[in-house]
Structure formats: C-alpha cells, structure tokens
Amino acid sequence: MNKQIEKKQNPSDVKRVTSALFNKVSLLIDKGKTNIAVSINNELTLMNWKIGYQIQNEILKSKRASYGKQVVVSLSQKLTDKYGKGWGEKHLRHCLRSAETFSEEQLLYAVRRQLNWTHIKTISYIEDELKRNFYLEMCLLENWSTRQLNDRISSLLYERTAISKKPEKTIKQDLEVLKNEQKLSPDLVFRDPYFLDFLGLKDTYSEKDLESAIIAELQRFILELGNDFAFLARQKRITIDNEDYKIDLLFYHRKLKCLVVIDLKLDRFKAAYKGQMELYLRWLEKYEVVEGENSPIGLILCSDSNKEHIELLRLDESKIKVATYLTELPPVKLLQEKLHKAISIAREKLENSTNDNV
C-alpha cells in the first residue's frame, strides 16, 4: 500500500522563505506609505490653493482693504469652530498668498514635481518674479527639502549666482530652458561669493591650510558648491613637457556633465591665473574627458576678484569663472547691499554693451 509521506519542512528553508517574503512585503508597504504621503501632500497643497483662490475672488468683489481683512478674520473663526486648530487667520493668509502668486497651472506643475505645501508657501512670499522662479526651478532640479530651501534663500543664493547679474530677458530664457528641457546653464551653478565660514579659518592661513580645511569639511563644502558636484581628486598631478603641475581640487558636475577644476588663491585675482587655469583645462580636455562629456570648467577662488582684470580678460565669455570666498560673514544687511549693488552695475554694463552693438 502506497502511503503519502508529508515532507517535514526544514526550519532553515522556512527562515529563508520568510526572510525573502518579508523584504518583498516591506518594500510594498514602504512604497505604499510613500505614495499615500505624496497623494495626501498633493491634495493638501491643491486644497489650500483653492481656498486661497476662493478668498481672493470674494475679496476682489470689494475694493476696500478693511473688507478683506474682516472676511479673513471672520472665516477663520467659523472654520476653527467647525474643524478645530489649523485654520487660523495666519494659515488663511498663506492660502491667499499662494493663490495671488501662482496660477493653477503653475501650482499643478510644482505639485506634480513633488513640492509640498511648505515649499509653495515659502516661495510664494518671494516678491521678485525672476527670483521666485529661480528658487522654484532649482528646488525642483536639486530636490531641496524645505530646510534646504530656507537655507538657500537665507544665504542669498540667487543674488550670488551669475544669472542674477544678467538682463531680465536672459534670466527668463535660461529658466525656461531649465524648466522645459532640464538643461542647466553654468550661470545657474556658479556663485560669487562663496561662504566658507564653516571652515573655521582665522587670521593668517596658507593655501595648504585652506585646502586641508575644505577636505576636512568636504560635505559642507559640496553643499555650498551645489548638490550635483562630486569630488574626484585633491592635488591631482599632471605632467606637461616633463614639468609637473598640481590641480588643487577636481570635481565633476553631473548636470553640466563636465569636470570642474577649482584653483585656490589667497590673494586678489591676477592675470597670470588665467593662463595657469587654461593650461589645466586644455590638459584635462586632451587626456581626461571621455565621450559624452562637455569641456571642463575652471573656478578660481580668490580673496578678491579684481573686476576690471576679469572684464578685460573676457573671462565671462570663457570656461573660466572667478569668484571670491568669505571665511567670515559680514552682517546680512551689508552683504545684501553689496550684492544688490553688484547686480545693478553688472546689468547696466551688459545692457549698455548690448545697446552699443546694435
């Protein structure tokens, strides 16, 4: 008589199958939670914008400022009575501001790219439209958290980028290309000045001290450079005509798809620095650039920039950028004044130059 013998399960097999199944189910749960969170955020952001839009329409029916304030206060009280905390006057004003700042199309674009309500609320309070669009597009491109967004705004990132010094028409064009084609121009990447206060350098220090401090604080240095910089080498040795040279710092920028040479200087920019950087860039282009990469870019970091030298050498037209660095930050108000003045002067020069060529 044939008997069916049930195989006794090996405990190790059960453990193995359970472990594999646990990993698969965990992935499904984590993905589900993420999708739910994203869905809730999208609905919350759209709801807040629609509330602001409704309030805006109601207020626009009357041209009295006091009427609008009374409407918001009264509505806040009634909503709080019905739904509890979270519907205060301040929140309703945030909703109103988002509707005043963004069209529904703009909001849907931002939401689809996973910006949350805090992102939208923060960006909506930036008065200048070009600056606002800059932070919106860079936030989407580099996937900033709300904390990173606030840090970038506080550090005057827009004012420190080369794009801010261009004519408005050029800024709009570059931001449109970034938005529609995901193509990043170097003017959106490189800054002036760079804030290196986190290095802890005081009084006198050498170029080696500066370089060593950057390597010790590499993660924070890369955050200051931008999210897409990847560190490759320090003191990279190259040989030309049996003569050795050393590149201070070598990075790669993922979005620009190019090598970036950083040359550190303790003094003001000098004309000779251009030739030195050109030598590095041409060597890298000949021996290091691989298929699909763009030409290398050089960044010369100096204690001061010597504006007229840079203008006469036409460095803005080359693959060489010059920027200053600050190891100690001045008062924010003073820094804002200096940057806004630099932007005004640069734009005026560009516009005059354009008019002269017409």
Image (cartoon, helix red, strand yellow):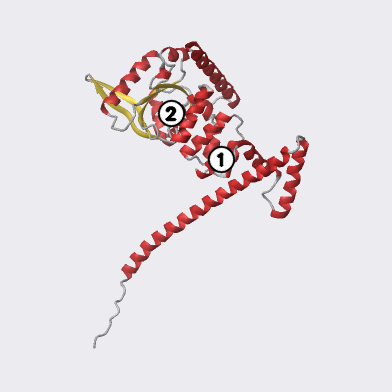
Residue 8 bears which disc, if any? none
- Kind of residue at badge 1: Glu
Q: Residue at x 39, y 13 (%)?
A: 271
User: Quick one: label 1, few (<14), some, or many (20+) residues within 10 Å?
Assistant: few
Instruction: Name the quadrant containing residue 212.
Output: top left
Q: Nearer the viewer, residue 6 or 250?
A: 6
Numbered disc 2: secondary structure? loop
Residue 94 position within the rendered picture, expressed as x and y whole percent measured from the top left: 65, 41
Residue 310 position within the rendered picture, expressed as x and y whole percent measured from the top left: 43, 15
Residue 180 position within the rendered picture, expressed as x and y whole percent measured from the top left: 46, 35
Judge whether 239 appears above or below 54 on screen.
Answer: above
Numbered disc 1: secondary structure? helix
Residue 315 position within the rendered picture, expressed as x and y whole percent measured from the top left: 41, 17
Judge whether 33 appears above or below 66 on screen.
Answer: below
Q: Residue at x 49, y 15 (%)?
A: 354
- Identify the mark nearer the N-term, 1 or 2: 1
Residue 185 bears which disc, if any? 2
In the current view of this chain or complex, which residue is farthest to the left?
242
User: Of discs 1 and 2, which sits in the foreground?
Assistant: 1
- Report whether 16 appears left or right of 54: left
In the current view of this chain or complex, which residue is farthest to the bottom?
1
Q: Is residue 2 visible?
A: yes
Judge whether 131 appears above or below 32 on screen.
Answer: above
Q: How many marks?
A: 2
- Report whether 221 appears left or right of 51: left
Q: CA distance from mark 1 to mark 2?
A: 25 Å
Residue where numbered disc 1 is placed? 105
| Quadrant of the image containing the N terminus | bottom left
